[in-house]
Amino acid sequence: EIIFSSSATVYGQKKPPPFSEYDELDPISPYGRTKLFFEMVLKDWVNSNLKNRAIILRYFNPVGAHRSGLIGEDQRENPNNLMPYIVQVAAGKQNYLSIFGNDYSTRDGTGERDYIHVLDVAKGHVKSVEKIKKIEKFQIINLGTGKGTTVLELLKTFEKVNEVNIPYKIVQRRTGDVAKLLANPEKASSIIDFKCKKTIEDMCFDAWNWQKNNPCGYLD
Ligand code: UDP
């Protein structure tokens, strides 16, 4: 039995989000292609033996940390992803956040993503382990909330929840970015009985709590 961490980057962009597991696949990044290739390898592996079973979990945008402040992401280099970058601005390690474009077709023009708390991602795995013997032997399941948050909404929520100031500048779009990426979370609910519980506020609070308690990550 294998539970595989795949990614929402496997989806193509011809159809507007939200994406369901049956939508067209066409990853644009090498990273997305590695995920899709391994999904295909696993499908063959499941078909090659009656005993083999697999669940593929397509993560959307995982963020946050454990509520205890003891387990989190140990960021050693300049981060590329939004939440770790916001956290570094709050910590004074970066002067400001560069927002990559405000002319997308979203509520406020900034990119919209489906952020999912890492603890919900972990719970999705626990549910998968519990269900893997009871469901069809090859399943692909989205892990996302189905709710979108823009860059500006995430920034404002982070400032409010943590009472910090995050300076930002609007800059050029980043190559390869899409306007919106959202999950259809219905299959997760019906097949493995999984629903996300954590809010955007939880994600912002926990990300900053981990950073505050561990300014040098796991090195201190
Ligand atoms: N983003 C941004 N500034 C940053 C990093 C990211 O404006 O320093 C935006 C990015 O354009 C996208 C969103 O934040 O709209 C999420 O980006 P991230 O890299 O975290 O995730 P992904 O691109 O994988 O969805």
Image (cartoon, rainbow, N blue to C red):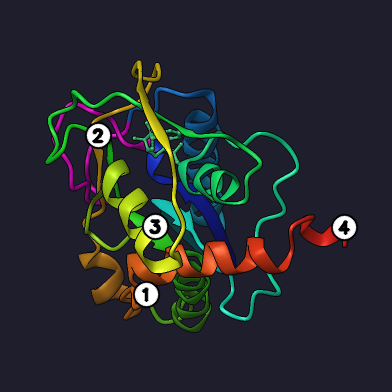
Residue 144 colored in magenta in the image: no
| Image quadrant in which the C terminus is located | bottom right
Disc on res. 219? 4
The residue identified by callout 1 is 198
Q: CA distance from mark 4 to mark 3?
A: 27 Å
Q: Which residues are magenta?
A: 10-25
Residue neighbourhood size for the residue with mark 4, other residues' Cα within 10 Å, grouped as few (<14), some (14–19), many (≥20): few
Secondary structure under tag 3 reads: helix
| Identity, as a three-letter code, of the amino acid under mark 3 | Glu
| Image quadrant in which the N terminus is located | bottom right
Q: CA distance from mark 4 to mark 2?
A: 35 Å
Q: Is residue 62 above or below residue 88?
A: below
- Residue 149 or 125: which is nearer the viewer? 149
Q: CA distance from mark 3 to mark 1?
A: 18 Å
The residue identified by callout 3 is 159
Give coordinates of residue 168: x percent, y percent: 40, 34
Disc with the residue nearer the chain's start (4 vs 1): 1
Front: mark 4 or 1: 4
| Identity, as a three-letter code, of the amino acid under mark 4 | Leu
| Identity, as a three-letter code, of the amino acid under mark 1 | Lys
The residue identified by callout 2 is 110
Give coordinates of residue 34: x percent, y percent: 55, 33
Magenta stretch: helix, strand or loop mostly: loop
Give coordinates of residue 132: x percent, y percent: 47, 75
